Amino acid sequence: MAEAKTLLRLVACGSVDDGKSTLIGRLLYDLGTIPDDTLAALEADSRTHGTRGGELDFALLVDGLMAEREQGITIDVAYRYFATEKRKFIVADGPGHTQYTRNMATAASNADVAILLIDARKGVLTQTRRHAFIASLMGVDQVILAITKMDLIGYDKAAYDGIVADFIEVAGALDIPRLAAIPVSGVSGDNIATHGASTPWYDGPTLIELLESAEPREAHRADQPLRMAVQSVVRPNLDFRGFAGRLSAGSVKPGDAIRILPSARTAKVARIVTADGDLPEAIAGQSVTLTLDHEVDCSRGDIIVAADAPSEIADQFQASIIWMSDSPLFPGRRYTMKIGAAQANATITEIRHGFDIDTFQHTPVKQLEPNGIGVCNVSLDRDIPFDAFEQNRETGGFILIDQDTNETAGAGLIHFALRRSQNVHWQALEIDRNAHAAIKNQKPAILWFTGLSGAGKSTLANLVEKRLHSLGRHTVLLDGDNVRHGLNRDLGFTPADRVENIRRVAEVAKLMADAGLIVLVAFISPFRAERELARSLAREGEFFEVFVDVPLAVAEGRDVKGLYKKARAGQLKNFTGIDSPYEAPLSPEIRIDAAATSAADAAEAIVAAISAKIVR
């Protein structure tokens, strides 16, 4: 029986117009993937319309094959399959534009080898360095440096040697352990499938030979400890209960002791079930269903691991994050983390540093801009099992999902758990929030007043508190201006500082609600994401978003503090409604038309709306 061909995953990357499509087109043609009649049609087209130097432009070969599709700012990662006698390949085309860094990260995330193209006329560019950095970050440790368009510089060996020397410095800074360089021409096919007569000074392997000799980066996964993320629980009848998933590392046999994380329950494997029958052993890369020797609590998102070599468990990490959203990443904003089949609420608690792509040096940043890369501290709302990304990319890699739009906002690679996650534990207290509330004869609540500056939030919150106080309720009022004199005096009004401002106040409001109080919060709080964070910290039915709604013209007409005047004059930057956005609530519990309703009437309406909900 012929031995099955191994699969190698490639990413082709480089700066704009470095020749990726031409190189891939020539590669596909030389391997017979593109039929001769297609080539004939393209040759006719080239004679009609002309191409560079009168020769066929092989970039045309990938039109429709490497379907880069531009929609707004999104370009899909395009994949193409081909094979030689020795091996099968999947090549991903990493877009060259800076704004598509997200797509390059996606393309590199599963690659074994990066083919990094450099136009011989241009040399090493910033985007070359960026793609090399992302490939290294994603664990791609085999790079083939393809110096393209050698025909356009007369196959100048000195120019080639200079580019290779420049990139060797880059590779050293990034610790790329396996690097090969090759001079190529996509148009004439030099050194792609066969050696080119124009480069007699190059006696190294062709591109195909380099690819056939490369090693899949997970060739040794079976030698690692067992890891299998549970994708689903299979129970077709009462006599069968199995756990389906794909082994990302290790191997397993019936009788092996396993541990289920994060619960840490143990069992032994009874059967390894597949559609083609039971297996005596499963190895990394196989999808199977495991049955166990006794009933255990296990569900989607859990990880089955070797009992004697489990993953770590923590709720705080340091991780590298590649930011993909069009909106910047701010510390304090909450996202959904998806790692394997598991999900958790995640908050970036600190951006430790960004990177200068030209030098790879650390740079201080307060936020990550779109396509930015940084090292961050991440905090979750629950413990999850994980491995460092460099050990297992499936149990160490994650994505962050915007909770407002449900779009992928970033990709992350876990480095290690923060020590605080292991050393800081929740202290059980005997007097709980119910006891605090009972002695006050009320239910805790958070009334979150939001609206433009000048809408009347502070006035209205003050009147509501006075009315509740007269009814014997125990309250506390957190006003935006007052809090900035103490707790938040170190914060400005940049988007990042606004996010942190609300995060701190939301945490304080939660603590005060736990003390049994009715908490009134009067803050502009312009971003929905932060108001949703505040809501998520409260108990079900205890959060009331009060939208104090007035048109901008009305709020500006009041301008009691003279802030709009300063903002219009350019003396006050990042002012909500002028040069910083206000995201109005979509479905607040209470909406007050503050332009048409008196403050006294509005206060009575709010008290009436919540009265029944705060009585024990």
Image: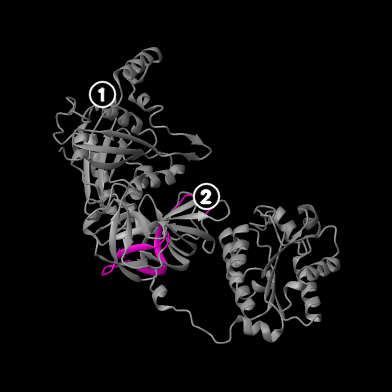
Image quadrant in which the N terminus is located: top left
Question: From the viewer's perspective, is the residue at label 1 or at label 2 nearer?
Answer: 2
Discs 1, 2 touching: Cβ within 8 Å: no
Rendered image quadrant of residue 264: bottom left
Image quadrant in which the C terminus is located: bottom right
Is residue 283 a member of the stretch shown in magenta? no
Above or below for 87 versus 424: above
Give the x, y percent position of residue 93: 36, 37
Give the x, y percent position of residue 484: 64, 71
Q: What residue range appears in magenta?
A: 299-328
Count of marks, rendered view: 2
Residue for badge 1:
188
Is residue 300 a member of the stretch shown in magenta? yes
Rendered image quadrant of residue 19: top left
Above or below for 11 versus 420: above
Give the x, y percent position of residue 504: 58, 70
Horizontally, residue 18 falls left or right of residue 591, namely left
Give the x, y percent position of residue 517: 68, 79
Horizontally, residue 8 falls left or right of residue 428, namely left
Going by the numbered disc 1, the residue's amino acid type is: Ser
